Amino acid sequence: MRRLGLVLGISGLVFLFSMASAYAYQDEEAKRGAEVFARRCSTCHGDRGQGLTDEWRATWPPTHQNCWKANCHGPQPYPENGFTLPRAVPALIGPNTLQRFATAADLYTYTRARMPFHAPGSLPEEDYRAVTAFLLQRHGIPPDGQPFDPEAARGVLLRPTVSAGEGTLRRIMDHPTVRYLPWWIVGGIGVAGLLWGTIWRLRRWS
Ligand code: HEC
């Protein structure tokens, strides 16, 4: 009996912990995402996600370095198919970047709807997933073998201001298993098992 309680308790905890880290992205996705980033994002956001810095523009041919000049992406008139580029193109990688996005799902939704700036929504869906995976990786969120899933990404947190405990709890609560199964049964069994094991132990000692 004691052993059964212990086994139940431990499996309950293992279950909760495995869910806490699930559903970020796959390693290969992030690799593909790096290619997408290089092809479709880096022109504006920099080769290292540093943003449209002077240093990055200086790597371009001289005639392409004045982004905000008239006839380029500044005041009109534009060349054909031209567009106005905001004065600041934000960095996406590095300290304090992507701060406005609380979760990976927020980042994905924004990117898919608004980027690339001059042609929003023009990438295949899987490229948006891949490039989001790449950005997650660069923000220190490890891959976990599960493909990036916009639904589950609501539980993947980007802001360090959210405490680890809060983050773990949110990931658990947002996990599909928890959302669609009576999780309190599984959690309850785990907790009851642990209690059971502990009480058994205490009784033996007393
Ligand atoms: C033509 C230039 C251009 C390209 C290409 C481009 N972006 Fe952007 N991006 C911008 C600009 C400008 C902003 C700021 C928009 C604003 O302030 O409304 C921005 C903002 C963002 C933001 C919000 C960052 C923040 O902290 O506010 C993300 C995320 C982003 N871009 C991702 C991407 C991704 C991923 C790609 C490639 C698929 C991409 N962008 C391609 C110009 C570009």
Image (cartoon, helix red, strand yellow):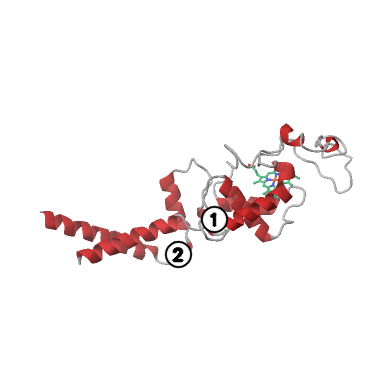
Between the residue at mark 2 and the residue at mark 1, the CA separation in whole angstroms equals 14 Å
Q: Residue at x 21, y 56 (%)?
A: 198
Neighbour tally class for label 1: few under 14, some 14-19, many 20 plus, Cα within 10 Å: many
For disc 1, does the CB lie below 8 Å from ligand 1? no
Q: Quadrant of the N terminus?
A: bottom left
- The image's mark for residue 120 is none
Cβ atoms under marks 2 and 1 closer than 8 Å: no
Q: Residue at x 15, y 55 (%)?
A: 202
Q: Position of residue 125 (x, y in %)?
A: 67, 60
Q: Residue at x 75, y 39 (%)?
A: 86
* Towards the viewer: 77 or 98: 98
- The image's mark for residue 153 is 1
Q: Where on the picture, by quarter, is residue 185? A: bottom left
Q: Amino acid at mark 2?
A: Thr
Q: Secondary structure at mark 2?
A: helix
Q: Mark 2 or mark 1: name the one nearer the start of the chain.
A: 1
Residue tagged 2:
177
Where is 150 relative to 166, above or below? Answer: below
Ligand 1 placement by image quarter: top right
Q: Position of residue 92 (x, y in %)?
A: 63, 42
> How many marks on residues?
2
Where is 170 relative to 9, above or below? Answer: above
Q: Is residue 109 visible?
A: no
Q: Amino acid at mark 1?
A: Ala
* Towards the viewer: 143 or 150: 143
Q: Quadrant of the C terminus?
A: bottom left
Q: Position of residue 191 (x, y in %)?
A: 29, 59
